[in-house]
Amino acid sequence: MPEQPPRSELSDFQKGEIVALSASYSAREIGRRLDIPHSTVSAFLQRYADRENYDNIHPTGRPRKTTSRGDRYLVRSAEANTCQPLTQLRLDTNLDISEQTIRRRLRENGISKHKAVNRPFLTAQHIAARLKWAREHSDWSIEQWQSVIWSDETMVRNQDDPRKKLVFRRCNKREKYDPKNVQPKSGYGGASQMVWGCFIGDKLGPIVFMDSSITKDVYINMLSGNLLPFIDILHADSQTNVIFQQDNATPHSCKGTKQWLQGEAEKHGFSIMEWPANSPDLNPIEHLWSHIKQELHRRYPDTWHLKGSPNVIRSILKERIHKVWWDIGPMLLANLVESMPRRIRAVIDARGNVTCY
């Protein structure tokens, strides 16, 4: 990239003339008389007033190797391809500077390397469907969202502690790798438990432990024995206009499940929400699962180190998850439901793409 030509400086004669004329004329008039931009005259007079000397102050240290134009080009190139390494960015910009200088220039502009966030892959069809769904529900009130039964499954592993371990240590390798400062990483040799749950408004629904692969028949049997009785209880408690939400996992969205749900919806008086694919950020129960896993390891620190066969560990996990689930308070559930307008707005603002949720 060509370097920007150096900016011309005032000569000693021009500086003397400006000082002499400043007693009688404004900066604009001096600039007109000497054919110099009045902004240059103003800046010079300000420096002269501050230092009482019009000699240039020569900067100390090594000269800066990039111009402001080069810095802007560097920033644009980094933002155009955010995944490229520094080595590739240096080759693409063809600037005669080191990678360390590139890193400093980017940092001066508030740019540095960060770990990319994990989000589901979205195709153009997914994005369009998410945006359409968000717009269709953008005028829903909190009362309408309180009529939705939010449901989902999650896998709980005893050796997956979602909490970050922060330690006090000095910045050296000896302390960095001291066993007391290391968070163990599973191989994986523990046990896992599949869990299904749901909630509506500020009321918890049933939690179900599933010990086999979730097929269409397993899923239908689970809903029949748990979801339908919960909906009947809601009706008995004067809850009307119940809407059941589920994602588009294959056991949920296959033809057999859809037909069964439609039939039961007519019998038990509920409707089924159409759901855009790959949209966990729109389902508040995802945050409930995160809470469950955090609380599991906070309340039972030995969960990671449970001993025994997978069946024994699963039995302990079920007991602990069950306690954590039924200790969830109504305030947490209400706050999750009240987040729905913000989630909808985030999807619309992102034009259907990924959001912060």
Image (cartoon, grey):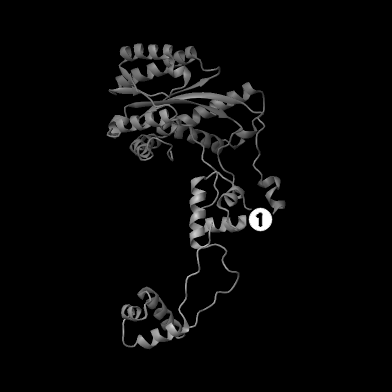
Please say if 184 is above or below 178.
Answer: above
- Note whether residue 4 is visible: yes
Number of numbered discs visible in the structure rendering: 1
Q: Is mark 1 on a helix, strand or loop?
A: loop
User: Mark 1 highlights which residue?
Assistant: 171
* Residue 302 or residue 17, whichever sits in front: 17
Image spot of residue 26 (x, y percent): 31, 81
**Displayed quadrant of residue 273:** top left
Q: Which residue lies furthest to the right in this view?
A: 174
Image spot of residue 134 (x, y percent): 34, 32
Please say if 179 is above or below 193.
Answer: below
Image spot of residue 135 (x, y percent): 31, 33
Q: Is residue 178 left or right of residue 89?
A: right
Q: Residue at x 49, y 62 (%)?
A: 68
Q: Is residue 157 left or right of residue 254?
A: right
Q: Residue at x 52, y 78 (%)?
A: 57
* Residue 120 or residue 273, whichever sits in front: 120
Please say if 59 is above or below 198.
Answer: below
Question: How many C-alpha atoms fall within 10 Å of the one at disc 1: few (<14), some, or many (≥20)?
Answer: few
Image spot of residue 354 (x, y percent): 43, 37
**Displayed quadrant of residue 172:** bottom right
